[in-house]
Image (cartoon, rainbow, N blue to C red):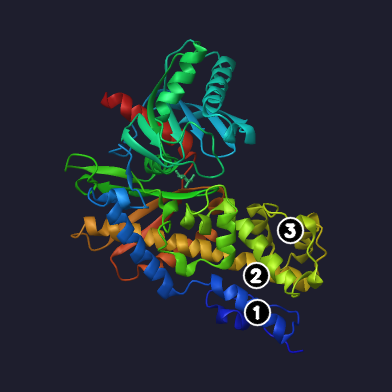
Amino acid sequence: MEAYEVDQAVIAMKQMTFKTKYQRSRDHMSIISDTLENYVMSEEVLQSVTQRLLKEMRKGLSKSTHSDAKVKMFPSFVKSIPDGKEDGLYLALDLGGTNFRVLLVKLQPGKKPVIESQIYKMSNEIMTGPGEELFDHIASCMAEFLERLELKDQVLPVGFTFSFPCRQDGLDKATLMAWTKGFSAPGVEGEEIVGLLRDAVHRRGDLNVSIVAVVNDTVGTLMSCAYDVSDCAVGLIVGTGCNCCYMEKLKNVELVPGTDGDMCVNMEWGAFGDDGVLDDIRTDVDLQVDSNSPNSGRQLYEKLISGMYMGEIVRRIIVQLAEAGVLFNGQVSEALRTPGNFDTAFVSQIEAYAPNGLNHLQSILHRLDVGAMHSDCEIVQLVCRVVSTRAAFLCASGIAAIARKTKDNYPDKDNLEITVGVDGSVYKKHPTFSKNIAEKVAQLNAGMGVRVKFALSHDGSGKGAALIAAVARNDS
Ligand code: GLC
């Protein structure tokens, strides 16, 4: 037996300072390092991912290559950021995960928006059952909310945040390309979703709403952040899913006529890699996670980063290590063996406890019927750290690409500064994710004349959707 430090054994772990106090045999250490080094993204790989994404972005924007592009770069028809003069009462709907929210947003120039909201759980039956029932459910939540606030008789403009990949043909026209994030309701893919919602509203016959805008959550996030920070040019979500939008020169958005001004582009970058361009960095576990997902072969970049998959990646690595005999004395409980049983929230908690909270960590593992020694806990912490660091770094490569693309639009500005507005549970709750992204973007773009700052965006899906509805109303 020989004492071995994990940071030496695993990759000479450039980004990591983790040291274990416990002794492990050289054999065990080399199994751990052989497994984990596949998740370590070198500067060279990350730079190459940035270059690959830049290429995909151009392919998605250009009319001649758009149909073959995996990163779709959908125009959002949002052309300007809010100017603070937006006014009035709006309804915002937010569908994008297991919670559906209805919000009433009061905008007043010079004052903070006032928001009243209600969360409605989306059951699995509704997420995967007939599309018509999904939209009937949305309409009935809206009716219940408006009734409670005694607003059912007032005509309200609605901003609908629908956080799935949609081709937009106007601010209130969006066709769902494919479900993501565990939704699979039949009869919606290929359909125009504002029409589906209007139909559901008409079926009820008791609602006085006018749906004026349909918005991706990234776009809402950008708008909501831009309301507070004027140089906000990018909206990023790292939650259940992962996606980004940014302000592009309209002349580069070839799917939309016009050459003057800007347009916000919903990148749908989750699909980056769906044509195989990221295959060299995907591990055996990534392949398993993908093939066990409801949308196998799709959203491959998202599956390396977002909260829907992070815990599952960690779980599978832990099972591999246990089966190889280096964790939990070789024992794998049924609970640990069950897909989906390792919440991404655990990853955040486990890393937050490092390095002094091994007892807390033992209790988390205990919930999965795993009896872990302190030395096991340290390895589990390391697995979490490697997987979440990879996610943050890959996301940073994406942001670095957007910053470079934006810089190309402003060749005369020597030191361009842009702010990325961010939302999502992984970004907000994980102890080091935000720091890891910011540091890595700065490293990747060092000397390129563009500096990226990050700002938390508050309630993009509510405030942002209402702002877009307000701008739409003023424009019409
Ligand atoms: C998925 C969706 C995308 C959304 C993202 C974050 O990637 O396809 O539209 O923005 O999740 O919620």
Tell which of 108 and 423 is nearer to you.
423
> Can you see residue 235?
no
Instruction: Please name the amino acid that badge 2 sits on.
Output: Leu
Q: Quadrant of the N terminus?
A: bottom right
Determine whether label 2 and label 1 are within 8 Å by CB.
yes
**Distance Cα–Cα, label 3 vs label 1:** 25 Å
Q: Which residue in the protein does label 1 denote?
A: 6
The residue under the point 42% across, 44% down is 218
Disc sitting over residue 337 in the figure: 3
Q: Position of residue 265 (x, y in %)?
A: 32, 45
Give the distance between the C-alpha atoms of the residues marked 2 and 1, in whole angstroms: 8 Å
Helix, strand, or loop for circle 3?
helix
Instruction: Give residue 431's quadrant in the image.
Output: bottom right
**Helix, strand, or loop for circle 2?**
helix
Quarter where residue 22 is shown: bottom right
Evaluate whether residue 193 shows in this view.
yes
For the residue pair 456 and 219, the one nearer the viewer reads as 219
Q: Residue 465: x and y, percent? A: 42, 33
**Residue 459, horizontal then vertical, whole percent:** 49, 39
Q: Nearer the viewer, mark 3 or mark 2?
A: 3
Residue occupying the far bottom of the picture = 2
Of helix, strand and loop, which one carries label 1? helix
For residue 407, the mark is none
The answer to which of marks 3 and 1 sits earlier in the sequence is 1
Above or below — where is 211 with respect to 33?
above
**Which amino acid does the dot numbered 1 rest on?**
Val
- What amino acid is found at the position of numbered circle 3 in the picture? Arg
Residue carrying label 2? 382
